[in-house]
Image (cartoon, grey):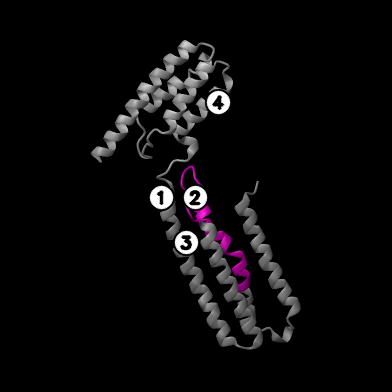
Amino acid sequence: MMNSRTWLQLASVVAGAVIVGILAIAVPIELWTANSVFASIILFLSFALPPFFVAPVPQAPHTDAPFIWLIGPLGRLWFLLLVLAASAVGLSIAGWHRASLALCLGWLGICIIGFALLNASTQIVTAAASQTKPANINARSNWFTLLQKLQLRTDDNDVRKSLERFAEEIQFAANEPPSAEPGENREIDAILGQLESSLSRPDEVSRLLRSAEVLLAQREHSLRAGRTSA
């Protein structure tokens, strides 16, 4: 099954072929020279080639940041290549063959340099993206979401208030560094995992939340100590 990038590549190739086909029909045969044919090939490549620039770019784990970042720079490069190629075709048909060849050479240089710069820049974006965690693998976000769901599932006002209070504590807790996960996270995970089956027992919910609050406080202390030593 083709993904969106494959469809974009297919569309660009078809668009290039259609444009060149229109030129072949619209331009009188006596105006076609070797230079015009070469410029038309460059125009076809201007449509067909840029979507394939994404192929060698690595993707950071759990994120599409490199590909999202590529949209702007790749779009500008694509537009520049199209303008140069279309100008080269126009000049070649008008008989300005030396100027057309100069634009074709400039097109080739910009294509190579642009691809190299995009590749190098995206490596930097990939490295930066790999140092961040998306919300769906962030422990605090998962805890907060779980507590919100549990609030909706309980009919006991005291339990709901206790869950809401602890959710606020988690919401304003310190962010953990992406490279290191506090040891308390697993223990808090285990405790919060028992809440759902204990919603009908307010005393048990209170006990679990007190234990989780103690661990959360220890987590805060560990994170502050880590930042101080760094």
Q: For the residue carrying disc 3, how many other residues have a C-alpha within 10 Å: few (<14), some (14-19), or many (20+)?
A: some
Q: Nearer the viewer, mark 1 or mark 3?
A: 1
Residues tagged 3 and 2 counted as in contact (Cβ below 8 A): no
- Residue nearest the viewer, comparing 145 with 123: 145
Whole-angstrom CA distance, mark 1 to mark 3, is 15 Å
Q: CA distance from mark 2 to mark 4?
A: 30 Å
| Residue to which mark 2 is pinned | 65
**27 left or right of 215 in image:** right
| Residue at x 46% of width, y 59% of height | 119
Quarter of image, res 19: bottom right
Q: What residue range appears in magenta? A: 42-69
Q: Which residue is mark 1?
A: 128
Rendered position, 211 above or below 33: above
- How crowded is the residue under tag 4: few (<14 C-alpha within 10 Å), some, or many (20+)? few
Q: Secondary structure at mark 4?
A: helix
Q: Earlier in the sequence, mark 2 or mark 4?
A: 2
Q: Which residue is mark 3?
A: 118
Q: Are marks 1 and 4 in contact (CB under 8 Å)?
A: no
Q: Which residue is mark 4?
A: 149
